[in-house]
Image (spheres, rainbow, N blue to C red):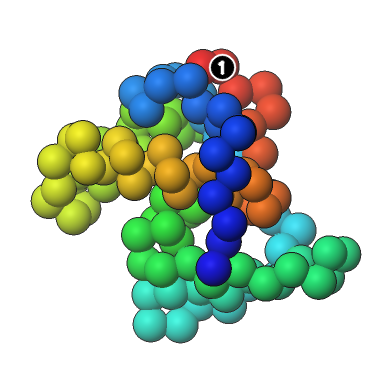
Amino acid sequence: MIPIDTGNSVIESEDCDARPARCEDWISRELDGEAIFYDIATDTTCRLNETALLIWQLCDGSTSVRNIVASLVSEYDVSKSEARADVRETLSQLHSVGLISTDGANA
């Protein structure tokens, strides 16, 4: 399980224009809609469920957090507030373990 970094302000607002980017230096394997990531340098392993994997895949450095939220609303037929909460928590977790970077993101 990925720890939650509650002190990390990956995004100022769930609807912000920040554009997180994937860190591609992890080894990953996808199976049945989930993924396992391994970082050789830190000997860290992370498992992402289907929703977290989609959020990570959308972190391409050009897709805003606002659009990631919209994608979840469309893909999973959830409310915008639920999608915001899921995106915020997932981005914080992904950032805390180094699966995404927010360098240069404009919040």
Left or right position of 63 against 42: left
Q: Residue furthest right?
A: 41
Q: Indicate the secondary structure of the residue bearing disc 1.
A: loop
Give the residue pinned by disc 1.
Answer: 106
Q: Amino acid at mark 1?
A: Asn
Q: How many marks?
A: 1
Left or right position of 100 against 30: right
Whether residue 5 is visible = yes
Q: Residue furthest bottom?
A: 31
| Looking at the image, residue 46 lies above or below residue 12 | below
Residue at 60% in and 33% down: 8
Residue at 50% in and 27% down: 11
- The spot of residue 61 in percent (x, y) is 57, 35
Q: Nearer the viewer, residue 102 or 85?
A: 85
Residue at 21% in and 35% down: 81
**Quadrant position of residue 45:** bottom right
- The spot of residue 12 in percent (x, y) is 48, 20
- The spot of residue 68 in percent (x, y) is 36, 39
Q: Quadrant of the N terminus?
A: bottom right
Q: Residues within 10 Å of mark 1 (few under 14, many from 20)?
A: few
Whether residue 58 is visible = no
**Quadrant position of residue 16:** top left
Residue at 65% in and 47% down: 96
Q: Residue furthest top?
A: 106
**Quadrant position of residue 54:** bottom left
- The spot of residue 46 in percent (x, y) is 60, 68
